[in-house]
Amino acid sequence: MTEVSPPDADILAATRHWLTRAVIGLNLCPFAKGVHVKRQIRYAISRARSLEAALTDLENELRHLDAADPDEVDTTLVIFPNAFGNFLDYNDALWFADRLLRQLRLDGTLQIASFHPRYQFDGTEPDDIENYTNRAPYPILHLLRETSIERAVDAFPDAADIYERNQATMRRLGHAGWRDWMAQRGDEEDSRENGNAGKPEGSSAAN
């Protein structure tokens, strides 16, 4: 029996909540706030259930980002609500994603970062709080422009320390603190509910 996945609106809401509360709210990525505020993030929901279908959607999104005006779309979150629920399967898929990037000759132009509900760094236990820096509500492939990364790194002299700082942030929070933090609604979510969200960020279903 095919598992029924949430509607697009719920998937986008959960992803935006994670982005605003965790990534931006905890300053896990100091580069994220700028593109979020400028509405330059594209949210692409892939309904793929197989690796082959997922790679087709990923190829479409890589080509789209490469061709897009950076002032309109600077980065893309490709969300997979129906695939890669197992982290080991997702980790294997990353190898194919990087190979696809090279096959399209976009390595050096774009990068792929990874987030997953059960993300686990090498050398950690599944429940270690440090893993939560890369835990998202759904499996996500984050497509970034190399030029944007270079500008961001130049603007943040301590960029090399981000990983260690994030790990320290998670250790201070602990599991209970993380749950409490993520359970809270952000100001932007209240604004959306009250009809004052402003210009919507780009979102689409990958085909």
Image: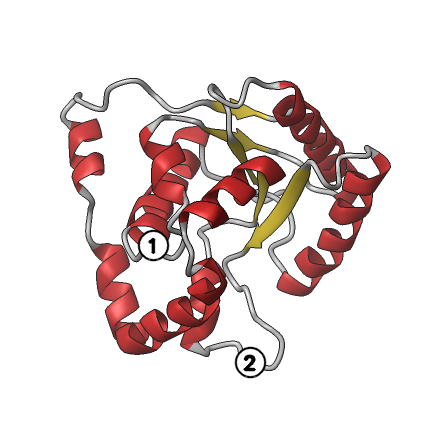
Label 2 crowd bin: few (<14), some (14–19), many (20+), radius 10 Å: few
Quarter of the figure with the C terminus: top right
Q: Quadrant of residue 9?
A: top left
Spot occupied by residue 14 in the image (x, y as percentages of width and height): 37, 43
Residue under the point 17% across and 21% down:
195
Q: How many marks?
A: 2
Q: Is residue 22 rendered to the left or right of residue 145?
A: left
Spot occupied by residue 45 in the image (x, y as percentages of width and height): 55, 32
What amino acid is found at the position of numbered circle 1 in the picture?
Ala
Where does label 2 land, which residue?
A: 124
In this rendered view, identify the residue nearer to me: 150 or 122.
150
Spot occupied by residue 16 in the image (x, y as percentages of width and height): 36, 39
Marks 2 and 1: CB-CB under 8 Å? no
CA distance separating discs 2 and 1: 20 Å
Residue under the point 20% across and 47% down:
185
Quarter of the figure with the N terminus: top right
What amino acid is found at the position of numbered circle 2 in the picture?
Thr
Residue under the point 28% across and 57% down:
182
Residue 93 visible within the image? yes
Q: Is residue 53 rendered to the left or right of residue 9?
A: right
Residue 145 visible within the image? no
Q: Is residue 25 rendered to the left or right of residue 195?
A: right
Q: Is residue 80 rendered to the left or right of residue 179?
A: right
Q: Quadrant of residue 192?
A: top left
Label 1 crowd bin: few (<14), some (14–19), many (20+), radius 10 Å: many
Q: Earlier in the sequence, mark 2 or mark 1?
A: 1
The label shown at residue 22 is 1
Q: Please, what secondary structure does the residue beneath circle 2 have?
A: loop
Q: Please, what secondary structure does the residue beneath circle 1 have?
A: helix
